[in-house]
Amino acid sequence: MRRANNFSQKSTGTYRCIDDINNLIIRIRIEEIFGESTINEAESEDVVESKDFHWQEKVFGRWEREFYKDKDNCVTDLDNAYHSKVSQLLSSEGVLYSHIDVDEFCRREEPVWDSKNITYTSTRNWDLDDEKSFFNDRHKLDFGAHLQECVRDPFFKNDYQYMYIMADFGEYSENTWIKSEYILCCLKYDHSKKILFVYPDFTDFHSYRVTINNDMSKSYRLTIENTSELEGDEIPERERRILDKIVSYERKLKEHAVGVDFATPPCDSLSAYVFFEILTAKVTEYDDIFVQYTIDLPDRWACRGEGSSLNGSTHSCRARKGTAHFSFTFETILCCDLKGIETAPSIPLPAIYFEIVSKDTWDRYRTEGLCYKRLPILQPGSYTFEMDCFRISPGSLTGNLRRFFIGDYRSYDDVRWIATPKGHEERFLNKYGVRTTSTGRLAFKMNVVHQSQCFWQDRRQKLLRDRLVESSAPLIKSVQQVLEAFKTAKRNMTEARRRI
């Protein structure tokens, strides 16, 4: 058995089959060429044969027809089936035939292919002189390594199906047919991946030159065409249905992850999703501490949503080397009423108050630190703060004894007193006479996410954000003024010391 050539790297075609492989039809056309010129410039051409092959269609060659015609040559069930088919066939003088996947030829593990007596060339002028035949390469196989690989994976099985299109250029010697068979086209189909391999590739814009070197050298022009009938509008419709299924599946995944009841805030309102994390607390006196927090909402603000709370407490934590690591997280949903925001002077900001409390083995509670922070809730983003803490000093011996023996937790009426109390409308807040002591630092982190139907409209979105920036500007400006005043006082003090 001879194969035409061995240049699979240059001419093997790989195709994805979206249709049923049984609809495949391949047309093989062979034309004899006279003269030594190129294919396009040949002196004359004589069509030897042109035939269409369906996928896994068995076409018998001349030698097979004579072999299976004799009942005594048929041993297996496949041979008997071929005998029945050959008996019903009319005599044919064609040179083209095929081997299908059930034939013994396709079941051979390493068919012997000899490429010495036949060569391929094409109008592309491919250089095939350096190609080595499969017959020479198969002797380089390491059978020991191959055996070890089979032992590691004894259940290895591919899902390939083969088909070979052949040509028999033999002749009669007296009354005996001397076959001279050649492989013209090899097809391999992967059912699992739906991929078809064609060797050599289809000749859409070129053709192959086949040279037969028997007793007399002959040249043939070979063309391989795909003449399968397209399904028309069925393929786009099938693709559309597949895409619809993919989109529907992705939508179900999103609904499963997010939920179908997606909460939408009311009109003319802003929902701020605030996520807090109390990081660390540094204290100097007692080690077993926990933190209590309270969120104070001014006018226009309200708390909504299940699980949202304006106050709470962390777990108890023992400080190591003066630092207690909490990593305590909580969240809340704050809703701001935006009605009349165009005429309002500013939007007040919510504030969060922290109390650092210690507890000993005798269940004595002591206040270790107080601090608060105006939340920059009008600007979405991530913020990290580290604040200084203080506590109210007793100011007398009796107060110090009470703190030591029974604890001084909540020696004040309202924790919001450390800031500007709610409802205070005077210009100045007098806290004269209150003695405080610096105790440590508290660090926390917050993330703010905004949601509002006003963002759906470009004009309202721009107006709303401008008003939010203007509302936060006075707070930023006041902080900057305090810092500038502090720097000026420090500079004046340094100059006074130099003069002394």
Image (cartoon, grey):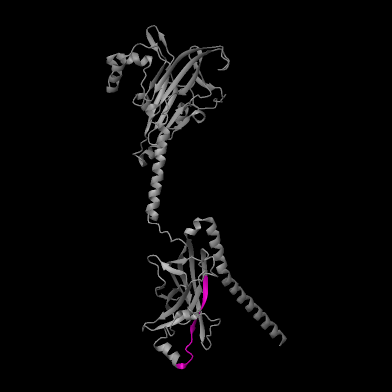
Q: Which span is picked out in magenta?
A: 385-397
Q: Is residue 392 above or below residue 228?
A: below
- The verdict on residue 122 being magenta is no
Residue situated in front as seen by the camera: 191 or 151: 191
Left or right of residue 487: residue 124: left
Q: Look at 28% across and 17% down and name the residue there.
A: 84
Q: Quadrant of residue 191?
A: top left
Q: Is residue 74 above or below residue 451?
A: above
Q: Quadrant of residue 311?
A: bottom left
Residue 433 appears at what percent x and percent y? 52, 89
Residue situated in front as seen by the camera: 272 or 125: 272
Q: How many marks?
A: 0
- The verdict on residue 390 being magenta is yes
Residue situated in front as seen by the camera: 75 or 194: 194
Q: Is residue 123 above or below residue 406?
A: above
Residue 398 appears at what percent x and percent y? 44, 93
Give the residue at the far bottom of this rendering: 397
Give the residue at the far top of this rendering: 174
Q: Look at 38% across and 46% down and name the residue there.
A: 249
Residue situated in front as seen by the camera: 16 or 378: 378
Q: Quadrant of residue 291?
A: bottom left
Residue 413 appears at what percent x and percent y? 43, 83
Residue 97 appears at what percent x and percent y? 39, 18
Give the residue at the far right of this rendering: 499
Quarter that holds the N terminus = top left
Asked whether the viewer can see residue 229, the reply is yes
* Chief secondary structure of the magenta portion: strand
Quarter that holds the C terminus = bottom right
Q: Look at 52% across and 27% down and name the residue there.
A: 131
Asked whether the viewer can see residue 143, the reply is no
